[in-house]
Image (spheres, rainbow, N blue to C red):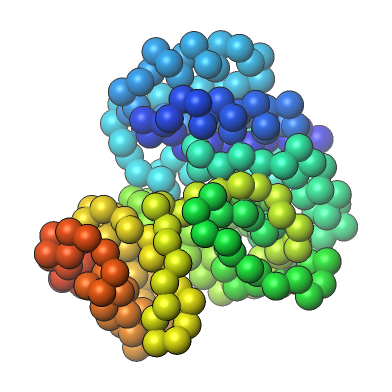
Amino acid sequence: MAHAAGIVLYNPDINRLEENISAIAPQVSELILIDNGSKNIDEIAELTAKYQNITYVRNDDNYGIAKALNQIIDKAEELGAEWVLTLDQDTVCQPDIIETYDSFSKRAKDNVGIITSMYKDRSVEVDFGLTKDYEKVSFCITSGAFNNIKSIKAVGGFDEKLFIDMVDYDICYALTRGGYKIIRLNYTGFLHEVGRSTSRKFFGKDIIIFNHSPLRKYYWVRNSIYLKRKYKLGFKSDVRVVKRMIQTLLYEDDKFHKLKSMFKGVADGYKL
């Protein structure tokens, strides 16, 4: 059975991308790169020329994460894969991640939509808590996720309205509501970076402050509101948005532009 992985590219740091590709390319039959209009195409071409198993697709513009993920799913299916690992451009996998995921997928039932694992954050220590070898979870990030192609397609794929941010929440909501499971293997499968994250105390709890740009703040809020409406999630979504605004005000720089973008996100979330 063909093993496939896919990476979405947008102006990647070439050294980090090389680390990423060199970790995953030997583990798969085909590595699919979907480039959302990167400017440093010469550097990317020089890097990818070193590998025989890379399929490179260049989009004319930045069409967003969700569309690129759908392109990875379609291309992997074309190549004869049943599962495909999706990665951010700066994620670095363990040398046994495909073998570990593949071994579990062979034992998994038909209703498993995604297999994921724990990860180590480059900026902040994330403690997932080891309880079992694996467990059912309600959410996982798209980076490091082993996606069952049939399951993803059965729920309509990734929602391209989202462009960026909350794309992972959406697909997890769609899968779990469609009767599919998300299984997390409790081993550290990859190294990942969530923005320029820092850890802070918020009402006595440890929280991660992501320090995202005003544009990312906009999409996070807009898409949170959109998902609340799409899945009828109720007031808890509003609470999360308000908390994120307060945390931005308390702990981040460029507060004015970030909060302005977030309020615009609220307004646009009701129009989407």
Tell me if I can see residue 12 in this picture.
Answer: yes
Identify the residue shown where x is 39% and y is 81%.
Answer: 202
Position of 253 relative to 247 (above/below): above
Q: Is residue 54 above or below residue 185?
A: above
The N terminus lies in quadrant: top right
- Residue at image point 67% right, 59% down: 118
Left or right, 219 with reference to 41: left
Q: In the depicted view, which residue is nearer to us: 71 or 182?
A: 182
Q: Quadrant of the C terminus?
A: bottom left
Q: Is residue 262 above or below residue 212?
A: below
Q: Nearer the viewer, residue 239 or 105?
A: 239
Q: Residue at x 66, y 41 (%)?
A: 93
Q: Position of residue 25 (x, y in %)?
A: 67, 27
Quadrant hosting residue 229: bottom left
Question: Picture coordinates of residue 67 (x, y %)?
Answer: 41, 44
x%, y% of residue 13?
43, 30
Image position, residue 239 (x, y; %): 33, 84
* Residue 269 in view (yes/no): no
Judged left or right of residue 183, residue 254 is left
